[in-house]
Image (tube, grey):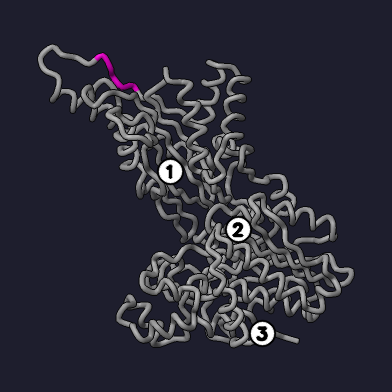
């Protein structure tokens, strides 16, 4: 019996999923996985094959779900990837209590349409749209994947279908990092041949007002480089006897924020420039001592360029900031110091990578002592401390052991890291893309355009063929937390690497209070396009 095949059935399923307020790291993020398990375990297929439906624990107590539908004697397997978590709802203002009730919220917005931005109001009046947190990103994609799983249970596909639903995609991708070794284990245990992975992330507009339809054959890469600025403390009454870390980090911000040199162009696609996601000093109590250290982290996206290229651009930005900091110090000192007065302090800022700083610390104190200090910090880590803060602490601790090098700026990387992946040049994938594009045009008069990189970040980064021109290890050796509370499962990633495609629903305004889903394309046309494309890959291989 079918439950999730018509537009109305999928809309009801979407509303049921959205009503779980599964904000990342909330209890509802656990509950929605249990709900998915509950609605699947009563199906005849899983009554007969209960070992094909599983909840897998993360280290922090959250869970991911795998649901395999296995055709007798088949090895060829299509993987469906979805995430069930969403971002918060504080941006909804007076509508916050309705954010997880799409039907009621949409009705209420009809009554108060003047509250909506112009484009959202036009959609509400002219189209078949449903508003609410998670409607677009990405519970609609999850609903469509469940409909594909139902088709597989009914014997529609000539091969195996494996649905993977993860938590934490909106924050650290801890769910997918746990799923990767689980997929590697299932591959061996169930004798699965992973042919291709489909994600159901929604289409992202390339610019405000963009009305195009997209599918993607890859996913953009993301790094989170950080700069620890380690200055020289002084009393506010002697401002030129030291160097304020806040001054240092402010000049870095000018060099990094929206810096055009980081924009990468591949074909007709471009990466957005860097933008700051964290900037603060690391002095947590008030005193008249100047802050000794400060940190800034930047979102830097990439497609094909190497980590060496990124590092060079980052270090060049630090060098430019260094020159301006030193010039600022001497220029301002000239107004304060009179006559023959001079300062005994003259800033000469060192620029280091984390790897270089670690080497300096080992040379001064020995590897055994550095390992002892590192292990001590790891064992004392407060579990509420995020990966960004703990990465910063590890770098700051090493900098304190090398005070003779200060002032210094230290480049390091922190999670999350999303490798850039692409199947754009895979002829096998291009045949499926052409089928989907032709069907959308022929049957629905929809111009579906292929884009190589999904720019919204996705968990396909951990299973697709890497597009980066350098090994991932080039980044990991500059990431202090790798192997110390964070683990990028490189070996498992390599073991399950497969082609990837993202074919998702049509929506608008992800991560905004006007997030919404267009129902006709998403729940009438998309399931048929996706089903036909999955059939193609089973028949081709």
The residues colored magenta run 344-348
Mark-to-mark CA distance, 3 and 2 = 26 Å
Q: Label 3's element?
A: loop
Q: Nearer the viewer, residue 194 or 294?
A: 294
Q: Earlier in the sequence, mark 1 or mark 3?
A: 3
Work out whether mark 3 precedes mark 2 in sequence or the reverse, and give the earlier one: 3
Where in the figure is residue 115, as x and y percent of width and height?
31, 78
Picture quarter containing residue 34? bottom right
User: Under tag 2, what secondary structure?
Assistant: helix
- Residue occupying image coordinates x 40% and y 46%: 278
Q: How far is mark 1 from mark 2, CA to CA?
A: 22 Å
What residue did someone put label 1 on?
297
Residue 10 is marked as: none
Asked whether residue 317 is drawn in magenta, I would say: no
Quarter location, residue 24: bottom right
Whole-number angstrom distance, CA of label 1 to CA of label 3: 45 Å
Q: Which label sits on residue 5?
A: 3
Image check: 106 left or right of 394?
Answer: left
**Label 1: how many Cα within 10 Å (few below 14, some 14–19, many 20+):** many
Q: Nearer the viewer, residue 6 or 274?
A: 6
Q: Main secondary structure of the magenta part?
A: loop
Q: Residue furthest left?
A: 339
Residue 416, percent from left and from top: 54, 48
Q: Position of residue 28 (x, y in %)?
A: 58, 65
The numbered dot on residue 459 is 2
> Quick check: can you spot residue 450?
no
Q: Secondary structure at mark 1?
A: strand
Depicted 508 relative to depicted 61: above or below: below
When the figure is inspected, residue 82 is found, relative to residue 353, above or below; the finding is below
Q: Which residue appears at 46% of the width and 34% of the height?
A: 411
């Amino acid at each position: 019996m079918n439950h999730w095949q018509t537009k109305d059935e999928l809309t009801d399923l979407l509303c049921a999923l959205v009503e779980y307020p599964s904000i990342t790291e909330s209890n509802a993020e656990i509950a929605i996985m249990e709900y998915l398990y509950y609605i699947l375990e009563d199906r005849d297929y899983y009554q007969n094959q209960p070992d094909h439906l599983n909840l897998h624990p993360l280290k922090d107590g959250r869970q991911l779900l795998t649901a395999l539908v296995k055709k007798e004697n088949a090895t060829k397997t299509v993987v469906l990837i979805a995430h069930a978590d969403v971002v918060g709802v504080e941006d909804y203002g007076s509508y916050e209590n309705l954010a997880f009730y799409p039907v009621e919220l949409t009705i209420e917005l009809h009554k108060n349409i003047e509250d909506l931005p112009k484009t959202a109001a036009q959609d509400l009046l002219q189209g078949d749209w449903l508003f609410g947190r998670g409607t677009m990103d990405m519970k609609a994609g999850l609903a469509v994947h469940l409909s594909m799983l139902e088709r597989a249970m009914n014997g529609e596909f000539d091969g195996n279908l494996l649905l993977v639903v993860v938590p934490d995609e909106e924050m650290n991708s801890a769910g997918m990092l746990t799923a990767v070794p689980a997929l590697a284990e299932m591959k061996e245990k169930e004798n699965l041949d992973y042919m291709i992975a489909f994600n159901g992330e929604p289409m992202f507009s390339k610019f405000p007002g963009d009305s195009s339809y997209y599918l993607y054959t890859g996913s953009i890469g993301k790094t989170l480089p950080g700069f620890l600025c380690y200055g020289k403390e002084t009393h506010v009454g002697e401002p030129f006897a030291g160097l304020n870390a806040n001054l240092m980090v402010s000049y870095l911000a000018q060099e990094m924020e929206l810096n055009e040199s980081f924009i990468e162009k591949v074909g007709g696609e471009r990466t957005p420039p860097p933008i700051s996601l964290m900037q603060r000093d690391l002095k947590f109590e008030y005193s008249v001592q100047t802050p000794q250290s400060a940190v800034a982290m930047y979102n830097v996206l990439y497609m094909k360029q190497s980590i060496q290229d990124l590092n060079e651009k980052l270090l060049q930005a630090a060098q430019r900031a260094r020159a301006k900091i030193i010039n600022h110090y001497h220029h301002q000192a000239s107004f304060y110091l009179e006559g023959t007065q001079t300062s005994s302090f003259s800033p000469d800022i060192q620029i280091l990578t984390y790897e270089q700083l670690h080497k300096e610390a080992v040379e001064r104190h020995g590897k055994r002592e550095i390992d002892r200090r590192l292990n001590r910090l790891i064992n004392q880590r407060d579990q509420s401390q995020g990966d960004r803060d703990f990465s910063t602490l590890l770098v700051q601790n090493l900098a304190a052991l090398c005070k003779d090098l200060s002032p210094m700026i230290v480049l390091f990387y922190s999670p999350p890291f999303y490798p850039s992946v692409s199947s754009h040049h895979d002829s096998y994938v291009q045949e499926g893309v052409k089928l989907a594009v032709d069907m959308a045009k022929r049957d629905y008069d929809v111009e579906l355009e292929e884009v190589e990189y999904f720019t919204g970040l996705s968990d396909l980064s951990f299973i697709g063929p890497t597009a980066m021109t350098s090994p991932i290890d080039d980044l990991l050796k500059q990431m202090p937390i790798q192997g110390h509370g964070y683990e990028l499962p490189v070996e498992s990633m390599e073991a399950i690497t497969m082609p990837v495609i993202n074919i998702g629903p049509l929506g608008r305004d992800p991560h905004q209070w006007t997030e919404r889903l267009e129902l006709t394309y998403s729940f009438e046309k998309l399931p048929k396009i996706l089903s036909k494309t999955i059939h193609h890959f089973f028949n081709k291989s």
